[in-house]
Structure formats: structure tokens, C-alpha cells
Amino acid sequence: MASQGNIIYQCSMALDNLIQKFRPSRNTNRCFHSIFYERESTALAGHKFSKFLWLFAVYLFTLFAIAYALRSQSNLQEKMKDPFVLGVTADIPSSAEPGMLEPYLDVENNPDAAALADKYHYRNIYQYYKFANFFSNADEESGYFRGRSINFDDPMMANILAKDNLLVGHGFDTLNQLSIYPENQYSVIVTQEMYNDLYPSDNEFEFPYLDLAHFDSTGYQAELFGDEYLYKKDRFQQEYFSEKFAFPFLIEPNDKILIPISAVVKKLPDGRDFLTTQGYYQNFMNNEPSLTQKYDNVVTLSFLMQLDEKLMPVKTLTPEASGGVVNNVFPQVFLEDLQVRIAAALSQVESCDDIYSYVKDMFMHQSYGEDKIQLTVSEYVMSFRPMVYVSVRLSDPVYFDEMQAFVQEWEKSETFKSSDLFEDVVDVIPFYDPNINTSESYYVPEYTSVGINFNDLREIDEFTQFFEDKTMVELEMSRVESLKNYKAVTRLVIFLIFGLVLISTLFIYSLLDNTVRDHLLKSRRNLGTFMAMGINMKSLYMLVMFTYIVLAGVLGLFGVTVIYFALLAVADVKVVLIDYRLLLLFITSLLFGFSAAIVLINRFFNKPPGDLIYGDDDSVLHRDKRVSTRLLNYTRKEKD
């Protein structure tokens, strides 16, 4: 390789010129510098760049191995990035006695339960339900999904709604204009996977609700994975094989049952598809709530309007309670204007022939006033995307089916399409105001599962054995065991990385030591002569060695980058390229290599020029006794 094309020489000269620009020296011989860098870089590179390629290969292998190890650790960390790993669950066996878990539940008010919580490092023990539902989307494409309940104020909710797990939405404790308490909320929190199953083309979370799946009126029969679940129309008695089904409201054929989605998250505890309140399941088991308070004597028409996104002042609702009222999401002036527009659109139903006649006559012959039809518009905040809740109080009652038919026909009518609402409204949904049962006869079914939220896992093995002995409940430990395995593998990866760094560092030190040692010993007489002439050879040699080491490391890092993009193009194997740990180890290896060279260079150039010229190899690099002193003593003896 031609010397003028030697990259080490070119980089050394560029660095020397940069130094001279900021720290000029009068006694600098630029021609000598050029000749020195040219010859030294050629000698250090070795025959056909063999020595330099060896150093480059060491850096390349080391950096790639470290990057791959860091990638493996990142993959494990991503798989174990479970926000619920400190929450352990178990199914309550059917043989368990009622109330068996009561002594352990009330940590705040029961001193014995609090003492156990302190001893075993857990926050609380709670009971919940596991169940399943059919849900459908706006196109009535249904699916079977597994859910579970949770207390709205459970500490686990903080993990569920954590920033790294929450995609959009809020929890169950959102105050609302319907005065539904959080424990009776009937909205659901769903996983992103479940949402995508029902709305595969929706990447912006446009649909803030689900429907309970529709069944025919003859048997309410559904077939799932070979198991049949029979629903009897009278009391919805069930024959089930694995999990109970829960519908929070009475289902009638062809009714569109709105279930609002309060949040979409990445993961849920127990690997479930959706999460809801305890009241969701309990209301179904009581079999008493109806869709409306007066099913056959409706005096209030209620429906929801989902507005176009351009009208949304916010995409995600994060309400702050103030005096029991949700802070406004829509400006009041906007709601007032919308109320006028809705009233105007409803007043025009008389011109449409395809709207249900009985209800249409009611709108035709009455005006909107305090004594007639009263219309109110407010915010509906139970779903993750705020909608508008419209309530029309009629002067005369009608059948619920008639009112529902009116809403559906009105949305599809030419009257609605010709109104100024049509461009702004995405969907009009009949609203079912649930009659939540809070009577003394309210039946609370037996819980199916138990969960424990731990502060840490130091005492979990001992607690697992204690809890099983006392309650016959065997905790699900798979996530905990996975976490322990992850920690063990993480320690192994860290040990591997440090081992690679140590081995590569020793190899680099050995390689540089041999390279510099051999070269300095071969050139020691010339270098000693230059030093005797007053030339600072030490600084020049340090500069060329710095260039030699850093260039090999940078090219090694560049080689890892090329391999990274090559692997991305042809395989699924990935390495970590942009990582502070990789860069830190890279800089550390460069500094260590240069430090090793500095030690050797200082030991060499700290000798007097006479030692370099007349001394032997052993005395130059290893012995402190100077050659010039020995020569002076020998000369004196000869004279005597």
C-alpha cells in the first residue's frame, strides 16, 4: 500500500495540523513531521497492514459481541417488561369455604392482616371475577374475549394506567353526568390486541365503544372452540364448561347494547383481553337491572353522538374532579350551539317519510319549550373519546322499541343527511340508561379468583407456602419464576459482557505492547539521535499512536454498523447499535489501549538520548540504571 495513501499517515497529519492551528509552535519542522508520520505509520501498520488489521479485527469482534449481548438482554427485558409482575393471582378452588379469605383482606382496618402484610411485603389481597363475553364491533362482527374484574381503586390500576402501558383513555373513577359511581361503572378497559381484533383498520382509536354481541331470539346459542354455551331467554341460565359469561344488562333481540371503552392498554393482568369493575359482573348475576327504568313507558329519548375528530378539543380525556362534576371537555358555548342544531334537525322530521310514524307525529305537533319537549346536551365521558349525550324529555310516553327505531331511522333519513349535523356527526347511538341494583336484596356472587399485590418479592416463596397451607389456594407463580430466570440470565449477560471486555482489553494490550515495543527497539538509536538534537519525539510518537488506536476502533465501530444493517436486510437477527453502554465500553477500550501505549512510550522516552543510543534492549525498557552512568564510571576507571 503506497505510503501517501496510508490512512494512518493522513489522519496523523490532519490531527497535527489541527493542533498547530490552535497551538502553533515556532520551532516546528513541518517537513520532518510529515516524513516521521509517513515512516512510523507504515512501520506500525505492518506488512500489508497486517498489524493494523489485527487491531481492527479485535475491536470489530469485541464491539459486535457486546452489541449482540446487549440486544439479547434487551429482548429479555422487553419480554419481562410486565407491569403486573408484582401482582400474583390464583383461582379459588370450588372446595374453598365461603369467607375463608376474609381474615387476610382488610389490611387497613385489621391489625392481624396488616401484620401479615408487613411480614410478607405485600400491599393488599383482593378477590375478583374471571369471566368471558362476546363483543361485536360497529359492523356486528363478534368475537369471544376473556375478561376479569377489578376494584376501581385497586393499586394495580396505577400500573394498568401507567404511561408506558396506557395507549389512550382513563380509569373507572371518572365522574360523569349520569351519577354512576365508579364501583358500578360498566365501561371496559381493553388490550390493544382485542381492539385491533374488532377494529383491524383503526390505527387512531376512532371507535370508543363496543357492542355486546347479538344473538337470535330462539336460543341465544353460541359455539366457541367446540364448547356450546346455552342461554335461556327467561333468566339467561347458563350451561358452561370453563368460564361464566357476564352480560350486565338484559338483552333483547336486535338491541344495540353500548359498552363504552374507557381505555386501551398494551397489557392487562392475567393475560386477559378486557377489564371492568366488580359491579359489571355482579349486576348480571343479580338478573335485575333493565335497560331503562321504564321499559314500556319511556318519556326520555337518550342517544349519543360521536363527533368528527376535527371538533374534538382533546383526543384523550384526563378529567379532574371538581365538586363532583367533570371539568368541561367541550366549551359550553359549543354545547349550546350543538343543542340548537340538534333541536332544529329533530323539528324537521315531519318532512321525512321513512321515520317511525308514531314518534314522528309527536315531534310534528309539539314545539321545543319548557312545557313541551325538553332537550339537553352534555358531555359523555365514560369512554376514552368524549362524545355528546343528548336527552330529549317527551310530554307523552312511548314504547322503548319505538323510540329506538326512531333514533336509528332518523340517523339514516334524508332529513338528517340534509341537516348541518351530518358532516360533523360520525355516529348516533341509542343510549340505554342502566338501572343499577343497589337494594338490600343485592346478591354478591362468590368470587372466582384472588390476587395479591406485592411491594417486593423477597418473601414471596415463604408467603406462597403459608398462604396455601392456610387457604388451600395455590398461587400462580409463572411470572415470578420468569422474573427470577430473567434476573439470572441478566447477570449471566453482564458477566459475559465484562468477560468480553476483559479478554479484548488484555488482547489489545498485548498486541499494542508487542507492536510498540518491537518498533521502538528497532528505531531507538534514530529516536535517541533526534532527541539529542532537541526534537520532542515523545509528543510526535504519542500523536501517531493515538491516531493508530482510535482509527482502528472507529473502523471497528463502522464495521459493526455495516453488519447491523446487513442483518436487518437479510435476517431477523438484530444487535444494539445506539446504546450508551456500547458507546461507554467502546470509549473505555480506546482509553485503555491508549493508556497502555502511553505507559510504554513514557518508559522509553523518559530515558536520556545516550541510553537509547548506546544501551542494550533490556536496559532501555526495563532497567532504571542508566547506560550513560555506567559508561562514565567505566571511562574513569580506564583513566585511572
Image (cartoon, helix red, strand yellow):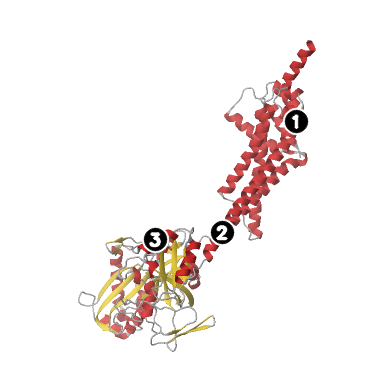
Mark number for residue 115? 3
Quadrant the C terminus occupies: top right
Q: Is mark 3 in CB contact (under 8 Å) with mark 1?
A: no
Image disc number at residue 486: 2
Asked whether 232 or 26 is in front, the reply is 232
Of tags 3 and 1, which is closer to the observer?
3
SS label for mark 2: helix
- Apparent side of residue 141 relative to residue 556 in the rendered image (left or right): left
Q: Residue 521 carries which label?
A: 1
The Cα–Cα distance between marks 2 and 1, rounded to whole angstroms, is 52 Å
Determine the residue located farthest toward the bottom in the rendered image.
218
Res. 12 visible in picture = no
- Residue 550 sits above or below residue 93 on the image: above
Of residues 338 and 305, the one drawn nearer to the viewer in this rendering: 305
Q: Where is residue 41 in the image (x, y as percent from the top left)?
A: 72, 35
In this picture, residue 6 sits left or right of residue 192: right
Residue at (49, 66) in percent of width and height: 465
Q: Residue at x 24, y 77 (%)?
A: 373
Name the kind of residue labelled 3 in the image: Ala
Classify residue 454 by image quadrant.
bottom left
